[in-house]
């Protein structure tokens, strides 16, 4: 199965797991950007989208994508049109932090 077919199969399984409404809200605009071994990069519309998906659906994605790609688990990276989603978002930090006056 090629990477595109694996991604399409993954989307079907994810929709079955989380329901059509949540799927349409969070996954319709996600696309496969690249695959490099166990590392999968998904393209999302913006940083908020990527952060929210990481916090709420990263485990679902790993559980679905890993076996379909022949791995126990995979590493998922998130990318917007301009950059990877900032990892510091897990700590509640904003990129370019500091206070405005």
Image (cartoon, grey):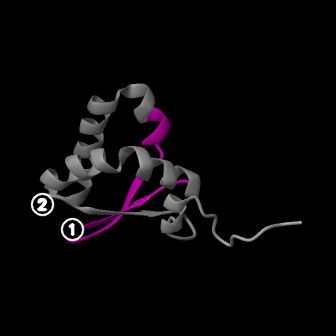
Query: In this view of the protein, which residue sits in the foreground, 45 or 66?
Result: 66
Query: In this view of the protein, which residue sits in the foreground, 32 or 71?
Result: 71
Q: Which residues are magenta?
A: 24-45
Q: Residue at x 57, y 58 (%)?
A: 92
Q: CA distance from mark 1 to mark 2?
A: 7 Å
The single residue placed furthest to the right in the displayed view is: 101
Q: Is residue 64 above or below residue 43?
A: above
Query: In this view of the protein, which residue sits in the foreground, 53 or 21?
Result: 53
Q: Residue at x 57, y 52 (%)?
A: 48
Q: Residues within 10 Å of mark 2 (few under 14, many from 20)?
A: few
Number of labelled discs? 2
Q: In the drawing, does residue 100 fall left or right of residue 90?
A: right
User: Quarter-wise, where is residue 36 in the image?
Assistant: bottom left
What label sits on residue 38 in the rendered view? 1
Query: CB under 8 Å between callouts 1 and 2?
Result: yes
Q: What x and y, as percent, mark residue 58?
A: 34, 51
> Circle 2 is placed at which residue position?
71
Q: What x and y, as percent, mark residue 71?
A: 12, 60
Q: The C terminus lies in which quarter of the figure?
A: bottom right
Q: Residue at x 50, y 54 (%)?
A: 51
Q: What x and y, as percent, mark residue 46?
A: 57, 56
Secondary structure state at the residue bearing disc 2: loop
Residue 43: within the magenta?
yes
């Amino acid at each position: 199965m090629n990477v595109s077919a694996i991604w399409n199969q993954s989307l079907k399984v994810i929709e079955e797991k989380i329901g059509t409404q949540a799927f349409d809200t969070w996954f319709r605009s996600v696309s496969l950007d690249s695959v490099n071994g166990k590392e999968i990069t998904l393209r999302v519309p913006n940083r908020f989208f990527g952060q929210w998906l990481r916090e709420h659906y990263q485990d679902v994605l790993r559980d679905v994508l890993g076996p379909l790609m022949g791995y126990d688990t995979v590493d998922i990276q998130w990318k917007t049109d301009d950059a990877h989603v900032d990892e510091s978002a897990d700590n509640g930090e904003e990129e370019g932090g500091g206070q405005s006056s």
